[in-house]
Image: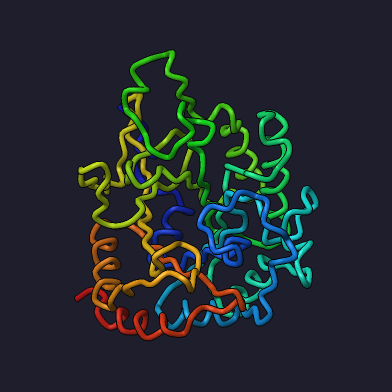
């Protein structure tokens, strides 16, 4: 029989679940290059959000009834939204140099929102990336900056693990890999995941760790340890199959133990995760957003709704009416 302690939430998980509703913010060099997955070569001086206003971001989140925000501190391109001491590829070389993570942390403190950060494991710019040991040390050093410079971080949202875990280096997952010891499937070893998780907990024990399982395995866990599971995009269809998230918080691990791992849904108001004015799109209605929230709440899960700030550094104001309207239908 598993220990009863593993089948109920930790105090940190309980506090996180009480937040319920958050804003995902995809912002970075991709906002200026008009790409979703940059290749790490777009010039840093192009990052120039002339009217950056993180108070505006936070105020829109508050108007929507959100209680936390999660910012893409580093996406797959490797561009850092804080002045990391370990790379020049980031805001430290922007025009002008700035600290977006720091500005957001100040806004969150001022307005009473919790802050989480997204960090891509995959890095298309770091020269040390092919050297697993060197890159694992690089990641720990950068995560250490984020956890030691900006106060409490409610969650660290990791992504891109497929690039070193999957034999084909693609997000798509093939369960057949698990049946063959020769498939090349990895379970976090190349990232030194166990050491990274332990390091995070040594700095901020209450910070919840997420490792995105990608949209074709919603609600599943890549490998332990993690504190939260993810499910991207409601009603996700992939290769002709509808993928239904596992929503039960009592998650059974591969060894048969039952552990408490809550779920976070995420969906986006943008057609792309990053802002792209060249892409036409149909905006999700207030009723759709409310349905996302109510479906997540019914599953005892959190909901993270993504918005991409524009190249001025502002959230498009047209989102506000939809988010306010959705709030009127929560729980109905």
Of the 4 image quadrants, the one containing the N terminus is top left
Q: Along the horizontal axis of the image, is 297 left or right of 225?
A: left
Query: Closer to the camera, 153 or 39?
Result: 39
Query: Closer to the camera, 89 or 120?
Result: 89
Q: Along the horizontal axis of the image, is 137 left or right of 211?
A: right
Of the 4 image quadrants, the one containing the C terminus is bottom left
The way the protein has been coloured in the rendering is rainbow
Q: Along the horizontal axis of the image, is 141 left or right of 167?
A: right
**Residue placed furthest toward the front:** 278
Query: Closer to the camera, 88 or 44?
Result: 44
Residue at x 57% of width, y 34% of height: 193
In the rendering, at what x and y percent does residue 49 appear?
A: 66, 75
**Can you tell which quarter of the image residue 304 is in?**
bottom left
Position above or below: 1 against 299: above
Residue at x 25% of width, y 41% of height: 239
In the rendering, at what x and y percent does residue 186 appear?
A: 49, 25
In the rendering, at what x and y percent does residue 315 appear?
A: 52, 78
Position above or below: 110 against 243: below
Residue 6 visible in the shown view: no
Position above or below: 255 against 291: above
Residue 226 visible in the shown view: yes
Position above or below: 267 against 88: below
Query: Closer to the camera, 323 or 89?
Result: 89
In the rendering, at what x and y percent does residue 131 appear?
A: 69, 29
């Amino acid at each position: 029989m598993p220990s009863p302690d593993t089948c109920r939430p930790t105090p940190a998980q309980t506090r996180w679940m009480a937040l319920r509703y958050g804003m995902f913010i995809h912002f970075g060099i991709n906002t200026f290059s008009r790409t979703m997955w940059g290749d790490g070569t777009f010039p840093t001086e192009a990052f120039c959000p002339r009217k950056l206003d993180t108070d505006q971001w936070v105020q829109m989140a508050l108007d929507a009834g959100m209680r936390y925000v999660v910012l893409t501190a580093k996406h797959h391109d490797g561009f850092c939204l804080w002045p990391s001491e370990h790379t020049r590829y980031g805001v430290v070389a922007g025009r002008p140099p700035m600290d977006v993570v720091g500005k957001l942390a100040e806004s969150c403190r001022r307005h009473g929102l919790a802050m989480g950060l997204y960090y891509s494991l995959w890095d298309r710019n770091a020269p040390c990336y092919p050297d697993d040991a060197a890159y694992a040390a690089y990641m720990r050093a950068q995560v250490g900056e984020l956890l030691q410079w900006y106060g409490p971080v409610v969650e660290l949202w990791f992504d891109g693990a497929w690039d070193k875990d999957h034999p084909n280096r693609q997000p798509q997952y093939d369960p057949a890999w698990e049946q063959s010891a020769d498939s090349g499937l990895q379970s976090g070893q190349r990232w030194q995941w166990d050491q990274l998780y332990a390091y995070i907990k040594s700095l901020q024990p209450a910070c919840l760790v997420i490792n995105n399982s990608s949209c074709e395995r919603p609600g599943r866990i890549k490998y332990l340890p993690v504190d939260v599971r993810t499910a991207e995009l409601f009603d996700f269809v992939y290769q002709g199959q509808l993928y239904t998230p596992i929503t039960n918080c009592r998650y059974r691990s591969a060894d048969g133990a039952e552990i408490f791992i809550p779920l976070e849904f995420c969906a986006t108001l943008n057609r792309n995760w990053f802002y792209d004015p060249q892409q036409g799109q149909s905006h999700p209605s207030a009723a759709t957003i409310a349905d996302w929230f109510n479906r997540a709440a019914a599953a005892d899960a959190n909901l993270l709704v993504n918005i991409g700030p524009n190249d001025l550094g502002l959230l498009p104001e047209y989102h506000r009416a939809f988010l306010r309207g959705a709030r009127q239908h929560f729980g109905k």
